[in-house]
Image (spheres, rainbow, N blue to C red):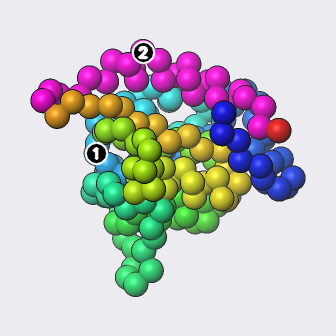
Amino acid sequence: KLLIRLSEDKMQSLSKHKNLKDARILITNDDGYEADGIKLLTEIIEPMVQEVWVIAPSKERSGSGHSLTVRRNIDVVQRSVDGTPTDCVILALNQIMESTKPDLVLSGINRGVNIAEDITYSGTVGAAYEATIAGVRAIALSQELSTAAKIDWSSARDNLGLVIQRLYNEDCK
């Protein structure tokens, strides 16, 4: 297990809702607002929680890591953000969802694995990292794919709900 120790005040915000069914969830990714992975993640999580917000890049931003936009304006159209996954989390936490902060950020489901040194380049991981810095629990999710075949989402479809439930119920202390 990889546990990140947070200050006491941030730790309290992590445990606002002990039961996932009462939670408010923010979903983002680096594959874009219309990507199959984010649609599947939303489909899986919606029946499990109280509220779901999807705020994601307007186009694919794979490889953006933990970067953010600093030298231009960011357009937001119906929760589709012309920026990086990190921008999406910052905008969600500080503007769009400011009065209703999420209990959990789910980033993904990324099309392709994020392992080894790839995590440093991953916008999927970067978004989860940004949420954690802000004191919000986060999980980055990826799905392996074969370059020779269409992606098989059955593993995520069959198992992801239970995985998220178990991780959410873990004691962070």
Of badges 2 and 1, the one in the foreground is 2
Q: CA distance from mark 2 to mark 1?
A: 22 Å
Report helix, strand or loop for mark 1. loop
Q: Is residue 65 left or right of residue 106?
A: left
* Quadrant of res 95: bottom right
**Residue 120 disc label:** none
Question: From the image, which quarter does the N terminus lie in?
Answer: top right
**Residue 34 disc label:** 1
Please state the extent of the stretch shown in magenta in the rendering: 148-172
- Residue 16 in magenta stretch: no
Residue linked to disc 2: 158
Mark 2 residue type = Asp
Q: Count neighbours of disc 2 (C-alpha within 10 A) and say few if under 14, some if 14 to 19, many if 20 or more.
A: few
The residue positioned farthest toward the right in the image shown? 8
Residues marked 2 and 1 touching at CB (< 8 Å): no
The structure residue drawn at horizontal position 66% and vertical position 59%, both measured from the top left corner, is: 133
The residue positioned farthest toward the left in the image shown? 148
- Residue 167 in magenta stretch: yes
Q: Residue 75: horizontal and vertical position, in percent?
A: 37, 70
Q: Count neighbours of disc 1 (C-alpha within 10 A) and say few if under 14, some if 14 to 19, many if 20 or more.
A: some
Q: Is residue 91 left or right of residue 62?
A: right
Dot placed on the residue nearer the N-terminal end, 2 or 1: 1
Q: Residue 117: horizontal and vertical position, in percent?
A: 43, 50
Q: Provide the major secondary structure of the magenta segment.
A: helix
The residue nearer to you, when weighing 135 against 74, is 135
Question: From the image, which quarter does the C terminus lie in?
Answer: top right
